[in-house]
Amino acid sequence: MKFKTYLFDFDGTLVDSMPAFISTMLRILDENNIKYGSDIVKIITPLGYKGTAKYFKELGVDMELDQMVALMNSYALDEYKYRIGAKSNVISVLKELRENGADLNVLTASPHSMLDSCLKRLGIYDLFTNVWSCDDFNTTKADTAIYKMAAEKIGAPVEEILFLDDNYNADKTAKLAGMRVCGVYDSSSEDYTDEIKGVADYYIYDFSELLKI
């Protein structure tokens, strides 16, 4: 095991939640008759709910930010609480890494209301030393500072942490911040596989491959 410290994304990396996340976000735009480009998922995934609300307001959604975030939460909460499952081999690999002494952490754009309840239902919340939402840092995963702040809180040099994410923008930003990066395959980001491979140190299609890194 080359790395001792891991920082995991949540949506699309640990759990198969991107279809629910995407449908929730695009529902807001569709209900407000807002047009958007084919790269919308790549843009909003690292931003979190607050960051996405700000971006949607720039696109023309006529709604207060707090109102928009509350609506996003109401649309998505049941999915995270009751239905979204872990991706293939995630639970067994996390347990093996932990048993081997690895320090496991989560950094995600999702709010704690969804993040914590989902991880606890799946029985893996206690495997992590830190479970962070972007809200805890008052910034987004599109900001290099968040990765440096996370490393400081973890207490490890930024370059010794392996960051795993299925999103190109997040992987690129973490790499710019100095972290080692492992891209993770997810069907929602399949069109950006080559881009992710271009910035990442590693790339995995299934979590079982992580044990070989």
Image (cartoon, helix red, strand yellow):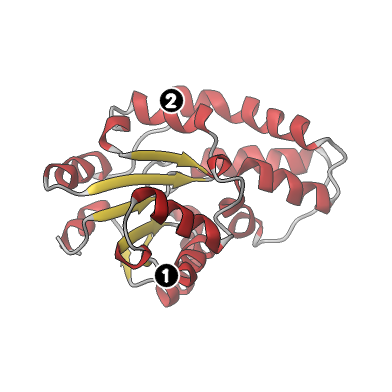
Q: Secondary structure at mark 2?
A: helix
**Relative to 60, 203 lies left or right:** left
On the image, the x and y values in percent for residue 163 come to 37, 59
The residue carrying mark 1 is 178
Which quadrant of the figure has residue 70? Answer: top right
Badge 1 amino acid: Gly
Query: In the rendered view, would you say 67 is above or below 137?
Result: above
Front-most of 59 and 66? Answer: 66
Q: Give the residue displayed 29% in from the left and 64% down from the top.
A: 160
N-terminal-most mark, 2 or 1: 2
The residue carrying mark 2 is 117
Q: Give the residue displayed 44% in from the left and 74% down from the top.
A: 199
| Cα–Cα gap, marks 2 and 1 | 31 Å
On the image, the x and y values in percent for residue 173 come to 52, 66
Badge 2 amino acid: Ser
On the image, the x and y values in percent for residue 9 come to 42, 49
**Relative to 201, 116 lies left or right:** right
Query: In the rendered view, would you say 39 is above or below 19?
Result: below
Q: Give the residue displayed 83% in from the left and 40% down from the top.
A: 32
On the image, the x and y values in percent for residue 123 come to 28, 27
Residue furthest to the left in view is 100
- Say which of marks 2 and 1 sits in front: 1
Q: Secondary structure at mark 1?
A: loop
Quarter occupied by the C terminus: bottom left
Please tell me how many numbered marks the rendered image carries.
2
Q: Callout 1: 10 Å neighbours few (<14), some, many (20+)?
A: some
